[in-house]
Image: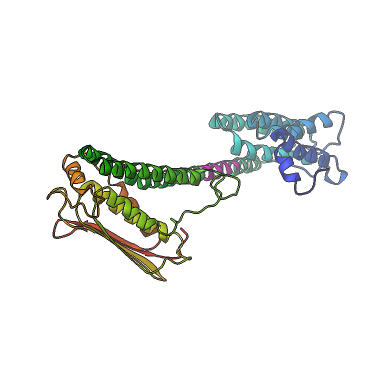
Amino acid sequence: MISPRQAPGWWHRLDVTVRDLPLGLLLLAGSFLPALHGKGTQVGDLPTRPFDALTIAVLGLECLPLAGRRRWPAVSLALVSLGFAVDQLRGYHSAAGTALPLALISTGAHLERHRRVTALVFSAAYVPLAVALHRLGSGGETASGFVTFYLALVLAWGVGAWLRSTRAAEAERRRRVAEDTRTTERTRIARELHDVVTHHVTAMVVQAEAARYLTAAPDRLDQTLTAVTDTGRRAISDLRHLLDLLNPDHGTGTGTGGTGVRTPPAGRLLTLVEQTRRAGQPVEFTEEGTPTESAGSADLVAYRVVQEALTNALKYAHGSRTSVRVRHDEKEITVEVGTDGSGASGGPAGSGEAGGSGGEAGRVGRAGGLPGGSGRGLVGLRERVALLGGDFSAGRQADGGFVVRARIPVGNPA
């Protein structure tokens, strides 16, 4: 047995003609009620006559085609109009005449093609009906009465046309919302991929190129190749996490990404800095305060700011001294990453903080072994910080270096 809660779903799964049929049956049954006899639509001044053997066929022709009013609107209108004409010419004046404006509304709302032709044919067919009713009557109905009834039918068509335009506008709005949503998601995915792939691949390219100059030092060569391997593993881990986020089951507990954790775990900033150092970039790292549990997305955005800034330092100022300062407090996280004007263009960097490969990495930078940037990273960071209500700036310094600053309010889950 179908419960009341299941009934709407069950009803909407039926064919549209089956769902529209009860309206026609209800109107047909109501037309035979004695209380409604002779009180239906009347065009002209023909006297009302009692129902006879032809009545059932005429009323059925008026009412039952309403079952196809949405699937075959033009056919439904033609049959209902024919039944209405016979109803008026025979003088039944039944309540089934209500089917005509209903058919007109449905045709105006659901007819897809030949709308103007249908309206013209219907209007032209009304003229001989009005002439016939005027001649069969006693002449009491004036031309204004026929015109008024025609205008009422035009109004019914107009209501259907308005419903059609409203439905089309809503469909267009939903299409635009869906398209905007897809564009936003693509942008977000591209941003995440840029953050993950660009940083790790840049570090791997620099480390692998530096290994060419270490063939005479097996220990240092092994250390550099180990760094490349570690960076590759981190890239795979971050990409797997990103794919988990894209999983439709993410956050539901049914998929592999059901944990829903996006914020980098504690210590990831230090790991990021160490990875950059092993790629040959001397980095000074300072972190003040402790990340709060209610930071929301601020921790992730701060991590991405540092990641992108260090990636750009590797690509465009390799070997230059770089400073990373991160400060946590209850209301916001401030990040500042600066790179001075020395480095690859001014000579090889020292090897102390770079894991012994600074000189070789400097030669890599001068050789132009890194691809050019797309500008997507800083733009994406500015959008992310702005989304959380923060401030972001990036620009050159007087000494030729580059500095990135961000103020990120905490507690926003966006």
Q: Position of residue 294 (x, y in %)?
A: 48, 66
Taking 55 as reference, is 389 above or below it? below
Query: In terms of depth relative to the viewer, which is nearer, 189 or 222?
Result: 222
Residue 94 seen in the current view = no
Residue 32 seen in the current view = yes
Query: In terms of depth relative to the viewer, which is nearer, 112 or 119?
Result: 112
Hey, which quadrant is residue 10 in on the image? top right
Within the magenta stretch, is there residue 61? Answer: no
In the image, farthest residue toward the bottom: 330
Q: Position of residue 354 (x, y in %)?
A: 25, 51
Q: Position of residue 363 (x, y in %)?
A: 17, 43
Q: Which residues are magenta?
A: 160-171
Hey, which quadrant is residue 69 in on the image? top right
Q: Which quadrant would the N terminus be assigned to in this image? A: top right
Within the magenta stretch, is there residue 162? Answer: yes
* Image side of residue 158 versus residue 275, left or right: right
